[in-house]
Amino acid sequence: AMSMGKPEHVVEKIVQSKLENFLKEKVLLEQPYFRDNKKTIEEFVKENIAKFGENITIKRFVRFELGE
């Protein structure tokens, strides 16, 4: 983007946005909860910690992908 003549502050925003999107896609706790897309997995876990008063840790998970 800098080679295209974009100002440095615009390039920073572009890079930050791409990094945030990458992390949302790859980091489990940043992904949307499948039953309620308005929450992340992290929010769901925190809600249930408060609800049950017990510490919750994710020991393992399985990734399913739809499509080709």
Image (cartoon, rainbow, N blue to C red):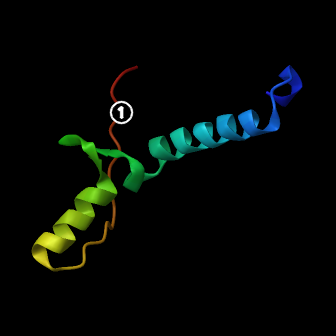
- Residue 60 appears in the rendering: yes
Q: Is residue 57 left or right of residue 54?
A: right
Residue 30 on image: x %, y %: 41, 51
28 lies above or below 9? below
| Residue at the (20%, 72%) spot, across then down | 49
Place residue 6 in its image quadrant: top right
The answer to whether residue 61 is above or below residue 6 is below
Q: Is residue 36 left or right of residue 4?
A: left
Residue at 11 percent of width and 74 percent of height: 52
Q: Amino acid at mark 1?
A: Glu
Task: Count how many numbered circles sit on residues in the image.
Answer: 1
12 to the left or right of 63? right
Q: Quadrant of the C terminus?
A: top left
- Residue 42 in the image, given as x and y percentages of width and height: 33, 59
Q: Which residue is at the front of the view, 46 or 56?
A: 46
Badge 1 element: loop
**Residue 14, position as x, y percentages in the image:** 66, 34
Per the image, the residue denoted by label 1 is 65
Dot 1: within a 10 Å radius of its alpha carbon, few (fewer than 14), some, or many (20 or more) residues? few
Viewer-closest of 10 and 41: 10
Q: Quadrant of residue 29?
A: bottom left
Q: Position of residue 50 (x, y in %)?
A: 18, 73
Q: Answer whether residue 34 is visible to the viewer in this image.
A: no
Q: Nearer the viewer, residue 28 or 6?
A: 6
Among all residues in the image, which is located at the extreme left?
Answer: 52
